[in-house]
Structure formats: structure tokens, C-alpha cells
Amino acid sequence: MDFTFTEEQQAAAEAARGVFAGVAPDAVPSPALVAGAVADDFDRALWATLAEADLLSLLLDAEYGGAGLDAIALCQVLRESAKVLARVPLLESGAAAAAVQAYGGEELKSALLAPAGRGELVLTVASSGRTGHDGAELAVTARQDGDAWILDGVQTAVPWAQVADHILVPAHTAGDRPLLAVVPRVHEGVGIGEQFSTNGERLGELRLESVRIAARDVIDADGAWEWLRELLTTGTCALALGLGERVLRMTSEYTGKREQFGFPVATFQAVAVQAADRYIDLRAMEATLWQAAWRVASGAPGTLPVSGDVAVAKIWASEGVRRIVQTAQHLHGGFGADVEYPLHRYHAWAKHLELSLGPASAHEEALGDLLAAHPLS
């Protein structure tokens, strides 16, 4: 496997580093210090800057104003965004637009893609289902009624639900066929309840009561929801990698300056061994991420379906990022508990990413099922 990035992918990462260089992760209030969410909206100024840098349209084709890149480029940008805890719907809006482009009808693509690439429309995805444990497509039913579809059900923990313009909602038909409906946030029968995530961001409980969606706004294509789910999961792994890299660097800088008995604590064997273990976690997270992103981007055949590589990446991301932030808290000592120091915000984000789209145990179970169905020779 050649993990060398193309010039275009490297350029996307460099542009992202330039945009995020001025973002301070401690500029947002601590979730421990506010009664509700840390903010009512995402960072609109940063969103506009990302649009100006053409980083919101990476996956879109040239006819929609995009660069025509792939999941690897998106993951490069997401990796950089997580290092500063960028409060923007970069993953959700980018993945949703990519799914519309890959599987949507021409009318839907014409209406959504170019404005989404310019940052004028914000998309998100209801990917957690009713409880966060069952398949998201099982939480909503869809039935045809003439030239429209009627949706009923509840989706929990929808990111950016209160501020997105459209929500991609997976649903299932009477024959258990999954489909995707593009639901406007302001629409008859649509209700959004207030929820909060571990990291202090707003989430929404999406309630659909006989919501009528025109057929042109429904993606009824084989594999559409599965592909979108795999892209979202892979992007979540990229966020976990970027966050883990920043936290390990913070830990290295702190232990290099903190002294005990006249020596930096980084020179103590117990500290060095723990840091080395976390470095190994990062390298495993990185290798499995790019394997999954390459499979999602290329659709190349493998011993297991693409979902197998995505499951492996998510297992490492969930377990690895948890171990990294826990070790960081431990090696920072009492300083790590200071809510005015950004480490605790990284810890809260890490916990949210660990559980997003399924914790490690859920993906281990899915991987076991895949191995049973596709035994390795």
C-alpha cells in the first residue's frame, strides 16, 4: 500500500493548516463553565474563510465549483480542523454534499451542490438513529404517496440540526430498503428538540410527523446510505487522529518544561514509556485511517468489504483517542484539571468522537460478523 499523497491532497492539507492557524481552541467557553451549549451557532466567520479557500467544495466536481478530490483530501482537512477544535460542520456538510453528488438526481444536485460548496447552504446528516445504538435507517419509516414520500420517526443527536438548512435523513421502506431524504429544517411536520453533546455543542432530536418530501428530494439508490455512513465514520476517524496528535504534542511540550528533582519529567522512564505507547496508538490510527479512506475513495476490492476497513479504523480511533487523552490528563497532573487550560476541552471532544457513529465495541462486533461471512484465506 502506497500512502503517498497526491499534490492536490497535500495542497488541501496545506490550505487547511493556513486557515486553521489563527483558530484558538480555548477561545470558546468551557463546557464545564456554561449551563447549556458553549454557543448557539457554529463559527460562521471560519466557515466563510473555509469557503473562500475552496475547502468546502473539495469533493464536488468542477461543474459545481469544486476541486473533484476524494475522501482522502477531506480527511486531510478534517485532521487539521480537529487540532484546533474547529466548530464548523465540515464533515457533515461535506459528506452530505458528496452523497448527493454520487447518488442524487440532477434536479437535487443542481439545487444543493453549488451553494453548499460556496458555504451558502449548510447540510447535515441524521446518523445516530433513535437511540444511538441501532441503525440510523431503522429510526424513520418512509412510504410513497403519489409523487412524494411520507416520513415518520425520530432521530437523536443530529449535529448542527438547529442551524443547518437541510438534513439528510436515512429511512427505510416497508420492504426494509434504505433510502435518504433531504429534509428542509423548516418544513411542515419537522420538529427539533434541544440536546447537548459531551463537548458542549448543540445537538438536535429530529422529530418527523407525516413529513411530505417530494420524490426529487429523495435518494432511492442502492448503497447510498451505506456509502455515506462509511464516509462519515472515516471522517470521524480523521478528526480523532488530528485531535490525538495535538494532545500528544501538548503533553510533550508540558512534560518537557515541567521539572521535578531538577529534571524535566519527560526524562523519567515511566513518563517516556507512556508517551511512547500513545505515539504507537497514533501511528496505528493513522495507518488504518488512510487504508479506510483509500477504500472509500477508490472502491477498490479487498479481502473484506469496505466496511471492514472502516470498522478497523474506527476501532483504533475510538480506543486510541481515549487512551491518548487519558494519558495526557495523567501526565499533566493537577494542571490538566484546570478548566481554563484547553486540555479538558480536547478530552470532552475525544469522548464525543469515541462514541460517535458507534464505539469500538460496536465496530468490533461488526468486524466479527464480516470475518465470519468473509473468512480470510
Image (spheres, helix red, strand yellow):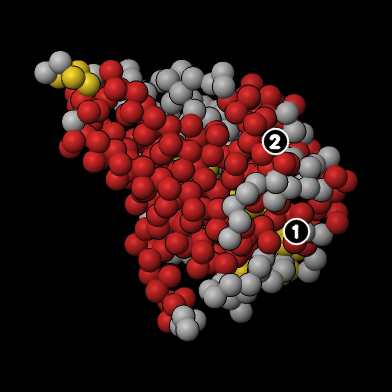
Residues at marks 1 and 2 touching, judged by CB atoms closer than 8 Å: no
Q: Which of the two labelled residues, at mark 1 and mark 2, occupies the earlier sequence position?
A: 2
Quadrant in which residue 218 is drawn: bottom right
- In the image, residue 208 sits, relative to residue 30, either above or below, namely below
Res 367 visible:
yes
Looking at the rendered structure, the secondary structure element under dot 2 is helix
Residue nearest the observer in this picture, 353 or 74: 74
Where residue 337 appears, as percent x and y from the top left, is 24, 25
Res 338 visible:
no
Where residue 354 appears, as percent x and y from the top left, is 39, 48
Looking at the rendered structure, the secondary structure element under dot 1 is helix
Crowding at mark 2 (Cα within 10 Å: few <14, some 14-19, many 20+): some
User: Residue at the location (51% across, 64% down)?
Assistant: 309
- In the image, residue 358 sits, relative to residue 78, either above or below, namely below
Q: Mark 1 points at which residue?
A: 102
Q: Which residue lies furthest to the top in this view?
A: 262
Q: Name the residue under label 2.
A: 11
Where residue 139 appears, as percent x and y from the top left, is 51, 62
- In the image, residue 325 sits, relative to residue 261, either above or below, namely below
Disc 1 residue type (three-letter): Ala
Where residue 335 appears, as percent x and y from the top left, is 23, 21
